[in-house]
Image (cartoon, rainbow, N blue to C red):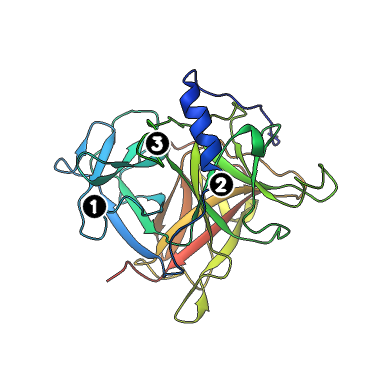
Amino acid sequence: MKTLQLPRLFFPANSMRASLAVVLLTIASSHGAAAPRVYRFISTAANTTDHSLTVDHPDFNGKPSHRLIVSQYSVGVSNPHNVSVLYNHATQRWQIFNSDFEDISVNAGFNVMIAPASKTTSVTPQNLDGGLAFFQTQKNNPEANLLCTHMSNPVPILNGVAQPNSIGLFFIPAGSRHPSIASRWALFQENGEPHVAAAYNILDVTKLKVGGSLISFRHAAVTANTANGETVITNALTDGKPDAVLFVQHFFSQGAAANNVDEILGVRYSDGKWRIFVQDGDDLPVTSGYMVVAFPTVTP
């Protein structure tokens, strides 16, 4: 059984990156509380070059202030690589790229959310405790549902910071750390590698609603619903709804036998059910927890 690992922080040799990341720690969303918008993009020969897919859409073009959340979904082709986002200021286009710089396969699918309410959080010495990079969103609420996406260049003067590892969320229990740190959510690297001075978009979806109904929930991968590298979701928001747009985030639960999930995840629809699956076919750890958001469909 693999348990939560707590590495230390590693800053790249470029000290400018580290100092800029300290500044980024204080950045909050400058947007209002506009509703999020969701889209699906599929890699093609026309929009994808090597490891990068360029988003060419009027809702994205020329809009560097967007905060994006991304989850992968499968239309039959897997992309076993973690992805990040960046804004190309030269072309004024957003890009989704494989964080390990391996090529994106044609017909790989991506769910993308424009999330005005999200906040940018950086990993710095000021918010690091062991391998946990804590942040303020939903402090004191272990039942919160959150999503996380790595943002490579959160400010134009910051060169992209690579982050190829899977990122999980962990709620630091009260009494387990200094009071200034405890009872907060934190980022951790699933494989136990040291953190890098990277920035992340964090979105609180706990009370997110569509049509007056909450659209976030938690899913537990257990023996009864998990096999062959995937776990089957059973929920009224997703059952029998192939047009639903899902975003998922692993979190390390407090329960017995909880596991890290050092895997590249995606979602796919089959036989009336949505499933969280491992992109390269590895086993999905049983007794693992996931935060899920399910929009009824893409933004018109």
Residue 247's x, y, as percent? 46, 56
Q: Is residue 132 visible?
A: no
Q: Amino acid at mark 1?
A: Gly
Q: What residue is at 45 percent from the left and 38 percent from the top?
A: 281
SS type, badge 1:
loop
Q: Are marks 3 and 2 in contact (CB under 8 Å)?
A: no
SS type, badge 3:
loop
Q: What residue is at 34 percent from the left and 28 percent from the top?
A: 101
Q: Residue furthest bottom?
A: 212
Q: Is residue 281 visible?
A: yes
Q: Nearer the viewer, mark 3 or mark 1?
A: 1
Numbered circle sitting on residue 62: 1
Q: Amino acid at mark 2?
A: Thr
Specify the quadrant that holds the C terminus. Answer: bottom left
Which numbered disc, 3 or 1, marks the residue that appears first in the sequence? 1
Q: Nearer the viewer, mark 2 or mark 1?
A: 2
Image vertical order of residue 295 relative to residue 179, above or below? below
Image vertical order of residue 250 relative to residue 143, above or below? above
The front one of 163 and 15 is 15
- Residue 137: which quarter of the image? bottom right
The residue wearing badge 3 is 80
The residue wearing badge 2 is 26
